[in-house]
Image (cartoon, grey):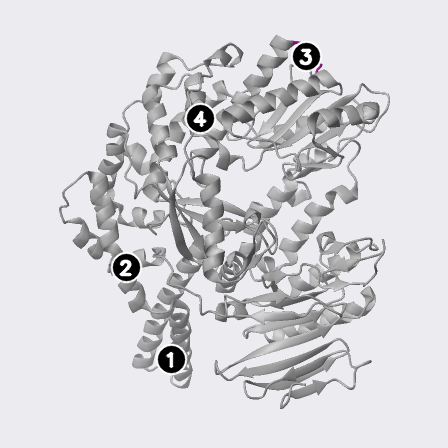
Amino acid sequence: MLPHWLFYVDHGGPGNRVWLAWDPNFVDVTVVETGAQFIHCSVFIRSFHSSVFITVVYGVNDVIGRRELWMELARISTVVTDSPWLVGGDFNTVLDSSEVCGLSGDIRGAADEFRGCLQDTGLIHVPMHGERFTWHNCSRDARSLWKRLDRLLVNDRWLENWPDTTYVSLGARTSDHSPLVLRGDTSNRVAGMFRFDNYLARSTEFIPAVRRVWRHHIVGSAMYAVTRKLKALKPIFRAQRQRKGDLSTNVSLARGFLDSAQTMLAADRHCPTLLHLEFCCKLVYRLASRLEQKMLHQRAKMAWLKDGDQCSRIFFRKVAKRRASKRVFQINTTDGRTLTSQPEVIDEFIHYYEELLGGTTRDSLIDLRYLRPWARHILTVDEAEDLIAPVSSAEIRQAIFDIDETKAPGPDGYSAGFYKAAWPVIGGEVTQAILDFFRTGRLLKQINATLISLIPKVNNPAVVAEFRPISCCNVLYKAITKILVQRMRSILDTLISPSQNAFVPGRSIGDNVLLAQELFCGYNQRNLPPRCALKVDLRKAYDTVEWDFLKAALTLFGFPEQFIQWIAECVTTPSYSVCINGAPHGFFRGARGLRQGDPMSPFLFVLVMEVLTLILRQRIEQNGGFSYHWRCEAVQLFQLSFADDLLLFSKAEPNSIQLFKDGLMDFAELSGLQANLQKSHLILSRSAAASRDSLLAILDFQEGHLPLRYLGLPLLASRLSISDCQPILRKIEARIKGWEGVMLSFAGRVQLIKSVLSALQGMLRYLGNRYAGRSMKVDWESGTSIPLIRGL
């Protein structure tokens, strides 16, 4: 077995827990240190001519014993901070309950300590494929238990060198543990798409290069001319980026030159030549550092972090984590097959999204104007005229400059940073191109091309459905839709019912949480009227909106025909490619849906959901037999909606539930939005327990229980407890103790607290039952005092 291999066994440890074996033809291994639960070694990889650190662990099977391992890993992390480091093995603990299948003891304390170790060491999870649970207790009865005890972790320096790193958990066969196989194959890597780096705009070459291209006259519309000139600039910017070289290498070289200059100056502090040399080296180093910071800030997309923090390490780490989480090396199909070849993986993604977003466009004649008697407001003539008023050049400039420079670009690769920096040269022609759209109502297909970026919904996604498709649109398209949105915002408050609070100016997500909490209070009491709530999950909500229904909804609310035509041209003419491992693949036309990433989509979706409100209101008033939820009849409240987060409330009796079901079915047939029966829940008060079976039989929903997570927060039937606060406390603790907090300067930590941590805890500050005479969930003094005096 393994002939000619070398072995290392820690004979000093109890039970020889960790063994090492390696082929000396490929690697040289030097053991640095050993402990009772680990072996730490330096590995020279001959093919790469570089060294890495690898720590192999085997954690003991008790919480107290593993604390020594956590402390040792934290200590080692401070030694290998600038070198690639991999840690792997059997940690004998899990991170959370999702890594356990079966009956297990209380894991919370052990999991908290393991998470603390990862935060202290800055280790990152490597994407895993294959068996989710790596250990089984080999029991064949009800005591059968699976856990994910084995894993591989790396630091950011490892991912900088090998961003494609992943590993596979194989079948256990006769063992109780699954073997882990590390992969770092880059043979399938393809050339990435063009992306404009914002740091190029700081170069003295930038404006002259843009001016040389922009002075050419191109026959055709202004929109066509702009797209041709943008295309002509791409090879120029690629060449500029190539001449500048690797920015991180440039910073290292500049730092080395500066150190050398200051060393020489220390030997002769009055030499004019050396003083001038040091001055020049400082200028070069500062310029190189600024360019690197600009590039990393754009790629890290850390919106809360301001430009002032000069810690490049935090940007490097964020970029590495983003890349690692979005790498896809294998995927499972719906029939259970595992695809590992890149062409098959790519085809699976393209086929899935072509089925979801493409296909045949439905073009039925839908008229929703019969719902107008139940509408809150229909646009007046003056309001309609304001929507289609001539677009000014100031509106266009404002729309361009409102787009964040760090936002992911569309298929053309240009960020908003390019447009802002080049505006003195390109502003006039870009303005004319956008005005062309509002005059003609037509978009070039190049401008409405869309790149689907895949964001994992869960750790280690196994199927395509576990990725969230975010549409990256071109800046020119975003500018057009931002102008439309800005005009819509002023009239949304008059059209949308008070029970909807998403994206309506002047309304808050907190209103929904407060009201929902009030309604759920007392659900655990028997002596109150029987009542229930439906938490409806809409399957692929944004992606399945039918376009003919959207146009009918806009007509229902009185939008002018020209404004509807502008929206329809934007919504119904997209083409898609899917970005997989940094490169675009496939091409297909859209046939339905609103793009997540289009500035206009949230506002259109709110109008779509308002139609559901009108359908339900019509049925309640016309059909009769509906019984309102306790304390809701006076204000005629039956629904709370925040985008696609939908709660329906009624008395717990069959007629009301049947009315909700019929209304949802009508809405599904018209709009294409269907309830996901597996993820939708019926929550019953304790006083409605006798009606449980009959109500569930009507709906086919799952039975839900409190506490219920709504808009990221727990809804409770009773007083807030420490366990209810644990999720938010864990998030805050992770941010403070984690690498984002450790690597920041003091000012950066202040910004982290202001922008991120305050938002995390702020939503928990809702009140208790005001009618019950109990104390508030957070007392008034703490809730209204400033942080300086221990307030919130």
Residue occupied by mark 2: 237
Residue occupied by mark 4: 550
Residue occupied by mark 1: 261
Question: In the visual, does 259 lie left or right of 89?
Answer: left
Residue 776 location (% of width, % of height)? 75, 31
Q: Tell me if mark 1 has few (under 14), some (14-19) or many (20+) residues whose alpha carbon lies within 10 angstroms of its own.
A: many
Magenta part of the chain: 624-628
Residue 511 location (% of width, % of height)? 62, 28
Q: Earlier in the sequence, mark 1 or mark 2?
A: 2
Depicted 2 relative to depicted 339: above or below: below
Q: Earlier in the sequence, mark 1 or mark 3?
A: 1
Q: Earlier in the sequence, mark 4 or mark 1?
A: 1
Q: Tell me if mark 4 has few (under 14), some (14-19) or many (20+) residues whose alpha carbon lies within 10 angstroms of its own.
A: many
Q: Quadrant of the C terminus?
A: top right
Nearer to us: label 1 or label 2? 2
Secondary structure type for disc 4: helix
Main SS, magenta residues: loop
Label 4 vs label 2: CA separation? 41 Å
Q: Earlier in the sequence, mark 4 or mark 2?
A: 2
Let me know if residue 504 appears in the view. no
Q: Quadrant of residue 615?
A: top right
Secondary structure type for disc 3: loop
Q: Quadrant of residue 553?
A: top left
Depicted 293 relative to depicted 524: above or below: below
